Amino acid sequence: MKTRLITRRRAIVTGLASVGGLLLTRYPKDLPPTYGNLLRMGDTLTYAAHRVLLPGQSLVKEYSERDITSFPATGTVDPGVSEKTPLGDEYRRFHAGRFADWRLPIDGRVSTPRTFSLAELKELPSRTQITRHTCEEGWTAIGQWHGVPLSLVLDAAGILPTARFVVLFSYDGWIDSIDLLDALHPQTILAYGMNGRDLPIQHGAPVRLRVERQMGYKSMKYLKRILVTDKFEDGGQNGNIQSGWAWYTGI
Ligand SMILES: Nc1nc2c(c(=O)[nH]1)N[C@H]1C(S)=C(S)[C@@H](COP(=O)(O)O)O[C@H]1N2
Ligand SMILES: [Mo]
């Protein structure tokens, strides 16, 4: 029984490896950075399928105002209360000052590492989009998001040609990353507004990421820092994929 199980598992693994191999030979650039990690095979399949099937910058569906639904808040709903850490204290101070002192650093593989205040982000050209959010817990909701395209912020910092990933850090200690194709996607925005108002605390104030072609948990709330890298970093202990989340969850 045991041997059969192992054999069958090995057959599945070999099968999937050859799918990976096929994609590797045909689409060498279409593999996720987690490729080769057996526990992350899902990444390889969804990432490769997306990269092969979707034109690079295809847009997700956008809705109209009458489609907007109620929107639950999940995970952290206030880092100032839930995070008993120096980060939580810092967040609480920013919150008390209506985020006037909050700064978003952007560093790493950029020619001009810099920070943005909320006011500075608001001065950049903005985008408004009404999209459907899909949570891995099984609910979806439609909301309107307003903010600055991440591509403009990356441009402003002078992204270097070797850059490949954008790592996001948050005030509740989450660390996650997206690749440049998602980072430069026109609907990937740093949102500071929701449904026509300032982004509420429970939805990620003062600024959250919206990355619309992936599951909801990739849309990091409570942004603290943006790091541009030329190689994949999993974020260590606080990295989302360390806690068992797939790195790529295209929808
Ligand atoms: N920093 C941070 N980002 C986060 C979360 C979180 O707990 N902390 N939750 C994630 C999950 S699982 C989802 S579904 C969405 C929820 O966004 P919402 O609370 O605005 O509905 O944010 C994602 N981004
Ligand atoms: Mo979620």
Image (cartoon, helix red, strand yellow):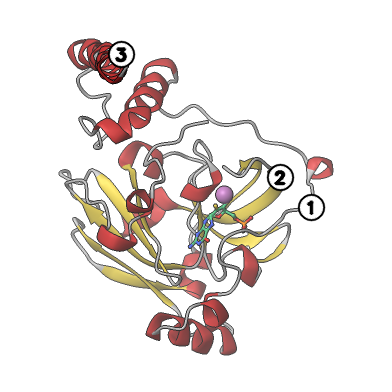
Q: Quadrant of residue 18?
A: top left
Residue 122 vertical position relative to residue 71 in the rendered view, above or below? below
Residue 103 visible in the picture? yes
Residue 72 vertical position relative to residue 9 in the rendered view, above or below? below
Is the C-beta of the residue carrying label 2 under 8 Å from the nearest atom of ligand 1? yes
Which element type, helix, strand or loop, lies under badge 2?
Answer: strand
Identified by mark 3, the residue type is Arg
Q: Earlier in the sequence, mark 3 or mark 2?
A: 3
Residue 18 vertical position relative to residue 86 in the rendered view, above or below? above
Residue position marked by numbered label 3 in the rendering:
8
Q: Residue 84 in the image: x percent, y percent? A: 46, 83
In front: 4, or 209?
A: 4
How many angstroms separate mark 3 from mark 1 (CA)?
46 Å
Image position of 33 (left or right of 245): left
The residue that appears at 38% across and 53% down in the rendered structure is 243
How many angstroms separate mark 2 from mark 1 (CA)?
7 Å
Q: Disc 3 or disc 1, which is closer to the eye?
A: 3
Q: Residue 188 in the image: x percent, y percent? A: 48, 45
Identified by mark 1, the residue type is Ser
How many angstroms separate mark 3 from mark 2 (CA)?
40 Å
The residue that appears at 31% across and 41% down in the rendered structure is 180
The residue that appears at 23% across and 34% down in the rendered structure is 37
Residue position marked by numbered label 1 in the rendering:
70
Which element type, helix, strand or loop, lies under badge 1?
Answer: loop
Circles 2, 1 touching at the beta carbon (< 8 Å): yes
Q: Residue 76 in the image: x percent, y percent? A: 56, 66
